[in-house]
């Protein structure tokens, strides 16, 4: 949902317990949309992120995780 949110507020209007879900979706959506360089509704021909697999899509994220884990292990030793 966070990648498709256009901040229309319909989810908040429909919530039977008055949870401000539009605010949550907007906050999370902004971060996710920046990460994937994706703007919902920008183009009907643009595939949704996470629906199309790209082999090298997260190499940078994986490398950062490996480096952080190695540093933590070195500190714990």
Image (spheres, rainbow, N blue to C red):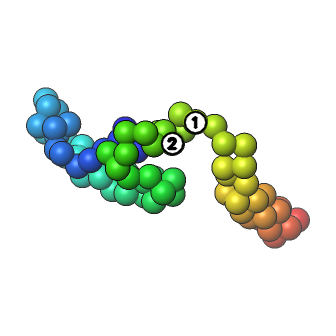
Q: Is residue 2 visible?
A: no
The image quarter containing residue 70 is: bottom right
Circles 1 and 2 in contact, beta carbons < 8 Å: yes
Badge 1 marks a residue whose secondary structure is loop
Q: Is residue 15 above or below residue 64?
A: above
Q: Position of residue 49 (x, y in %)?
A: 51, 42
Q: Residues within 10 Å of mark 1 (few under 14, many from 20)?
A: few
Identity of the residue drawn at 16% across and 38% down = 10
Q: Position of residue 20 (x, y in %)?
A: 19, 46
Q: Residues within 10 Å of mark 2 (few under 14, many from 20)?
A: some
Q: Is residue 64 above or below residue 53?
A: below
Identity of the residue drawn at 29% across and 52% down = 26
The answer to whether 66 appears left or right of 8 in the picture is right
Identity of the residue drawn at 35% across and 50% down = 42
Q: Position of residue 2 (x, y in %)?
A: 38, 44
Quadrant of image for the C terminus: bottom right
In front: 14, or 59?
Answer: 59
Identity of the residue drawn at 73% across and 54% down = 59
In front: 68, or 25?
Answer: 25
Q: Quickly name the residue at label 1.
A: 52
The image quarter containing residue 53 is: top right
Q: Quickly name the residue at label 2.
A: 49
In front: 75, or 45?
Answer: 45
Badge 2 marks a residue whose secondary structure is loop
Q: Position of residue 71 (x, y in %)?
A: 80, 68
The answer to whether 77 appears left or right of 63 in the picture is right
């Amino acid at each position: 949902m966070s990648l498709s949110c256009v901040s229309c507020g319909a989810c908040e209007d429909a919530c039977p317990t008055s949870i401000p879900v539009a605010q949550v979706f907007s906050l999370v959506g902004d971060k996710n949309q920046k990460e994937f360089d994706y703007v919902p509704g920008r183009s009907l021909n643009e595939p949704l992120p996470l629906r199309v697999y790209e082999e090298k899509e997260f190499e940078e994220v994986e490398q950062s995780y490996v480096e952080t884990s190695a540093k933590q292990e070195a500190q714990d030793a």
